[in-house]
Image: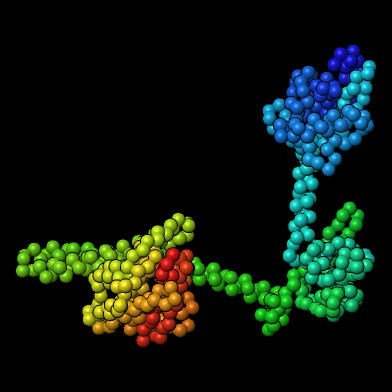
Amino acid sequence: MEVFKKGSNIFKILSEAVSEGIVIVNKSQIIVGTNAAANSLFGYDEDELLGQHLDVLIPKKYHHNHHKHVSGFMDKSHKRQMGHNQELYGARKDGSQFPVEAGLNPFSVYDNNYVMALVIDITVRKKAEQELKHWANIFNESLNEIYIFDVNTMLFIDVNKGALKNIGYDISELRKMTPVDIKPHLDKEGFLKEINPILEGKKDKLKFNTTHQRKDGTTYPVEVHLQKSSTGDHETLVAIILDITEQEAYTQKLEQTVAKRTSQLEEALVKEKELGELKTKFLSLVSHEFKTPLSGILTSATLAGKYPREDQQEKREKHLKTIQAKVKYLNNIINDFLSIERLESGKVKYNYTNFPLSKVINEVIYDANMLLKEGQNIVYPENIDAIFIDFDEKILDLILTNLINNAIKYSSEMSTIHISATEKDDLLIIAVRDEGIGIPEEEQKHIFNRYFRAENALLNQGTGIGLNIVKTHLENLGGSIIFSSVQDQGSIFTITLPITN
């Protein structure tokens, strides 16, 4: 360190004239000299670093390897870039880290060996390199084909992996070719005419359909998106190619891709409109579904109060049963909405237990009896007392409640709901058959969609979410649900689920 004090004026004059940070260490890797640029770079005051070990400027996780690098430079005594092809980082006084580039220069003064490190903060460069690498990856890994070719010679300059894979040529072959060489239905004149608007500057971008030919002679339809680009004074054209083989198979009647895109957009707008209408309809439906039973409860409660005498007990019980049924209905709606919320948030936790099937069916039918219309009855399944199942009891209750309540709701008075249960190959098959209004054939594909209600069911109470919940739970638990239905004759819903977990 004394050496640098003796020549401090010369060292300061020379070091302060250098924009890079200068850090000089002795053989023990003790810092003996720095310039203002280095102090500023690492966040230290003047002379604050003198006498400290070089480790103070190196992140802890790099200390071990760094000692080897510095020792090696001193031993070999020649200039070189430190950490060639490696990531180097410096540590500031405040603990923050930043990428650096360091050139190491071993030298001797009065038989003492030193290393001078020229340090540059390359944060900005690293960020630019990362961004460049990111865009290069996007270019190379794109599933679409990307071709870059010269404006004047039309020769390909570069292509991405997607293009090489689909077209079959390697990059060296393509650099001797032009776009015309892979377009069997276009000669040079026809191609130039196609892209003339962009060459003359009349358009910034072009989109057109054509056919490409692979190296093996096979062809495929493509949609070309073309635009100009430049690197310095060198002008190029960039073509992004979409292989539309599958699309064209479905759009043979469309004359051009623009019409197809327009059709898709219109379809999306229609779906958007339908979704908006569905939401509005749902809100109205929910309001109605709560308002109607609440009004019924209020009316029945009021009427029940008008029959205080003992001989009027039968009339009171009639209104009390109405209240119970409507409360049960509201409770089912709330349970459905809670199920939707839990399913969407992923908070559903299934609790498997072993229980007799008859227990759940007895409870569901008991509750359903309060909803039966005049003359309706439920045919209890036969021979189920010996059936035990490993399943979530509450979920099975919810599933059967939805199916049986639907059967009651969409069936007329004096009708019968049939329930059957059978075991087959470690599976339990439960069917609920009604004699109700059935589902129109053209609407059956939507029956498990959330909030969907068939046109012939709109006058009945319901939210259109029950079957969606049933199907989701069954799929989560390894089961399934199917149905068959004939309008005005009735429906059969059949669920299949594993007997053992």
What residue do we see at 25% from left, 83% from top?
414
Left or right: 190 with respect to 343? Answer: right
Q: Position of residue 266 (x, y in %)?
A: 60, 73
Q: Residue at x 79, y 19 (%)?
A: 50
Q: How is the image coloured?
A: rainbow
Query: Which residue is drawn at the image coordinates 83% and 33% (left, top)?
Result: 69
Figure quadrant of residue 135: bottom right
> Which quadrant holds the N terminus?
top right
157 left or right of 60 in image? right
Q: Position of residue 227 (x, y in %)?
A: 80, 64
Visible residue check, residue 54: yes
Q: Is residue 263 left or right of residue 52?
A: left
Q: Which of 294/246 is in front?
A: 246
Choose between 266 and 426: the one closer to the eye: 426
Q: Nearer the viewer, residue 459 or 66?
A: 66
Residue 423 versus residue 78 in the image, above or below: below
